[in-house]
């Protein structure tokens, strides 16, 4: 086992330990899926921030910056932040006051249980695909950390670890670990940019290199106002209606915390989302770039940052999909009413969704 892989294993053991401790405190389905609606100012903003800026934003922004330029990557990062700022004052309060456990509950309250079940069926595949993307990104990190691990094996290991990690402590354990994960993510990206800029001769030289590399490509077509509006509308509107974000908002302990958590989390996205853009590297090469420019311990920090970004997102996607599956589909159809049985069913739903996400990620 390489030192980097050993360090990542130690990091994961810490996550499992937190989950195991929290698991002993869980007594109901709501405790598991929405943390008993107990998240305060210390956890609310960080869990939204860490969840919303995972592999898609951190690794994906590098690919966007490489293929479409720094401006496009910035639009993705700032657009997602704007979506969070929008959900705070507009949607957070009415969603929290309804006492939802999943987003599909909103359709049951507004229409009927049949519509809620249909909504769950429609929403689950999106969460599974997002979880699969995070699992694949985790597998790619493992292949860089250990040359003996190929992508298929890396994805398999990643799926096993993420399912086991998420199924233990539910939303409360995820929120606590997100507090650590958000800090590690930001610090690791800053360290990477500083190291690459130092090797390139300074930050201005790095930006110049990235700009020259992009200019050497075939010129992009002129973007009109409608296309520009679409570029911004996708991350903004996608953030506002995302089931994973709604789940985090309704897990807070009050309307004030729900609103404020989304607003505070929306201030952070430009840093993790926009940082990879000046590096000017396509997605799969970002971990390799870190391996080339960062010495041992700093590369371990970066690998831990990527794993943090992935875990903080995949736990929410699996909890969301599992909650929709069990709370809105299986439990009502099988007449499961005991809170202990619902808790067990929710855990089983998370495991089932994780097992389904693994093959998709390959």
Image (cartoon, rainbow, N blue to C red):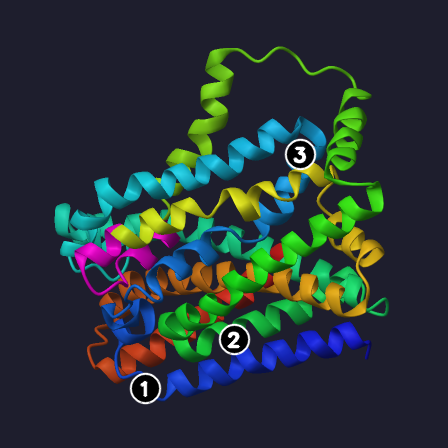
Q: The residue tagged with tag 2: helix, strand or loop?
A: helix
The one nearer the camera, 16 or 336, is: 16
Instruction: Say which mark, if any, is on residue 165.
Output: 2
Instruction: Say which mark, if any, is on residue 65.
Output: 3
Q: Of the two numbered discs 1 and 3 on the same chain, state the one appearing first in sequence.
A: 1
- Circle 3 residues within 10 Å: few <14, some 14–19, many ≥20: many
Q: Residue under label 1, please give it.
A: 25
Asked if residue 223 lies left or right of residue 293, the reply is: left
The one nearer the camera, 187 or 291, is: 187
Is residue 121 in view from this perspective? no
- Image coordinates of residue 79 in percent, x first then y, are 45, 35
Work out which quarter of the rendered image holds the C terminus and state it: bottom right
Q: Are marks 2 and 1 in contact (CB under 8 Å)?
A: no
- Image coordinates of residue 128 in percent, x first then y, are 49, 55
In the displayed structure, would residue 67 be above or below residue 38?
A: above
Give the distance between the C-alpha atoms of the residues marked 2 and 1, in whole angstroms.
16 Å
Work out which quarter of the rendered image holds the N terminus and state it: bottom right
Magenta stretch bounds: 243-259
């Amino acid at each position: 086992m390489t030192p980097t892989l050993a360090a990542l294993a130690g990091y994961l053991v810490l996550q499992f330990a937190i989950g195991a401790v929290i698991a002993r405190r869980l007594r109901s389905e709501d405790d598991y899926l929405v943390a008993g609606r107990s998240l305060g100012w210390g956890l609310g903003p960080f869990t939204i921030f860490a969840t919303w800026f995972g592999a898609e934003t951190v690794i994906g922004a590098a690919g966007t910056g490489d293929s479409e330029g720094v401006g496009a990557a910035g639009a993705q990062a700032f657009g997602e932040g704007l979506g969070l700022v929008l959900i705070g004052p507009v949607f957070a309060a009415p969603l929290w006051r309804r006492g939802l456990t999943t987003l599909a509950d909103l359709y049951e309250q507004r229409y009927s249980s049949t519509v809620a079940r249909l909504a769950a069926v429609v929403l689950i595949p999106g969460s599974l695909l997002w979880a699969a993307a995070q699992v694949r990104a985790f597998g790619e990190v493992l292949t860089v950390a250990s040359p003996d691990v190929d992508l298929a094996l890396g994805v398999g290991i990643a799926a096993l670890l993420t399912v086991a990690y998420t199924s233990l402590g539910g939303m409360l354990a995820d929120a606590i670990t997100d507090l650590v994960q958000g800090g590690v993510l930001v610090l690791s990206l800053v360290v990477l940019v500083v190291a690459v800029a130092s090797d390139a001769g300074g930050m201005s030289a790095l930006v110049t290199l990235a700009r020259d590399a992009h200019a050497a490509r075939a010129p992009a077509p002129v973007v009109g106002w409608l296309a520009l509006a679409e570029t911004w509308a996708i991350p903004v509107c996608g953030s506002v209606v995302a089931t994973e974000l709604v789940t985090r908002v309704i897990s807070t302990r009050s309307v004030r915390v729900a609103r404020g958590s989304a607003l505070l989390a929306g201030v952070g996205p430009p840093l993790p989302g926009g940082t990879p853009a000046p590096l000017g590297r396509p997605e799969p090469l970002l971990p390799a770039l870190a391996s080339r420019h960062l010495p041992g311990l700093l590369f371990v920090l970066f690998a831990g940052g990527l794993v943090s970004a992935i875990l903080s997102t995949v736990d929410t996607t699996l909890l969301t999909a599992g909650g929709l599956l069990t709370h809105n589909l299986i439990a009502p159809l099988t007449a499961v009413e005991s809170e202990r049985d619902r808790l067990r069913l929710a855990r089983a739903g998370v495991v089932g969704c994780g097992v389904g996400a693994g093959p998709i990620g390959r």
